[in-house]
Amino acid sequence: MVVAINYKTDEERAAMRRSGRIVGQILAELRALIKPGITTRELDAYAESRARAMGAEPAFKGYRNYPASLCASVNEVIIHGIPSNRVLREGDIVGLDFGVLFEGFYGDAAVTCPVGRVDEKAEALIAASEAAFFEGLERLRDGGRISDISHAIQSCVETRGFSVIRDFVGHGIGRALHEEPQIPNFGAPGRGPIIRKGLTLAIEPMIAAGRPEVEILSDGWTACTRDRSLASHFEHTVALTENGPEILSLPDLTDVPRKPGEEKPYA
């Protein structure tokens, strides 16, 4: 089946970079706020307030009736965790997924963060989701195929002993939050649409420490691992340029708060 892909001009990509930078900045600030005792509702309120202060519209709030601006997914929650009065505790991990609409274009990114000290398996899981993103990004090459990205992500995750979630996918992004093409995080290489300059994607490995099966809770949004094993999510908005892949959702590193002893933010 032929899918309609909206390839972006240099000017459109520049607008997406501005949108993505807001997302990256806010996620970096959220990461610095995470500590035992904070609630996911507090993180949501901060994210929405900061986005509006920067002139952006939270992308998720009201999207298909989603009730918040931030997705905050704790421990076994893979994605779409609705912020609440749940208090984060030492040893938890929390996935923060955030997006904005700015100057007509969307930005979307996610990071999974430890809350205080976490065990080695949680650390390895978080590291694997980030590593898988970068393995996928390496396959964003002119003339390649979308499933080259998928295969690279799956190979990276499974080599490290974890599972890829198969029920959800990455996606194209631009003037709409979700555009074609879809990007599964598994599959054989050499399939799907051809990659070429101007392609803008949200590449987002979603992985589990245990089995990959998913359960959607009664709220219709919260997606958990069925076996309640830990899950991790990492995402950036990216583009293929004449100089190769570019991450559009990085923060301005000169203005990112850091935790004591930390050399760099999440990206």
Image: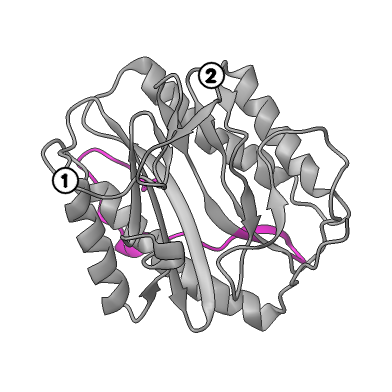
Splitting the image into 4 quarters, where does residue 91 fall? Answer: top left
Splitting the image into 4 quarters, where does residue 75 fall? Answer: top left
Say few, some or many: other residues with alpha carbon within 10 Å of mark 2 (under 14 / 14 to 19 / 20 or more): some
At 69% from the left and 26% from the top, the residue drawn is 155
Splitting the image into 4 quarters, where does residue 117 fall? Answer: top left
Confirm or deny contact between disc 2 and disc 1 (CB under 8 A): no
Q: Position of residue 13 (x, y in %)?
A: 63, 74
At 75% from the left and 72% from the top, the residue drawn is 7
Residues shaded magenta: 238-267
Q: Which mark is residue 61?
A: none
Label 2 is placed on what type of residue? Arg
Looking at marks 2 and 1 on the same chain, the residue that comes earlier in the sequence is marked by 1
Overall secondary structure of the magenta section:
loop
Residue of label 2:
211
| Magenta stretch contains residue 150 | no
Q: Nearer the viewer, residue 244 or 207?
A: 207
At 59% from the left and 42% from the top, the residue drawn is 168
Q: Of helix, strand and loop, which one carries label 1?
A: loop
Q: Nearer the viewer, residue 110 or 197?
A: 110
Residue of label 1:
39
Calculate the distance from the C-alpha at mark 2 to the C-alpha at mark 1: 28 Å
| Left or right relative to 162: residue 226 | left
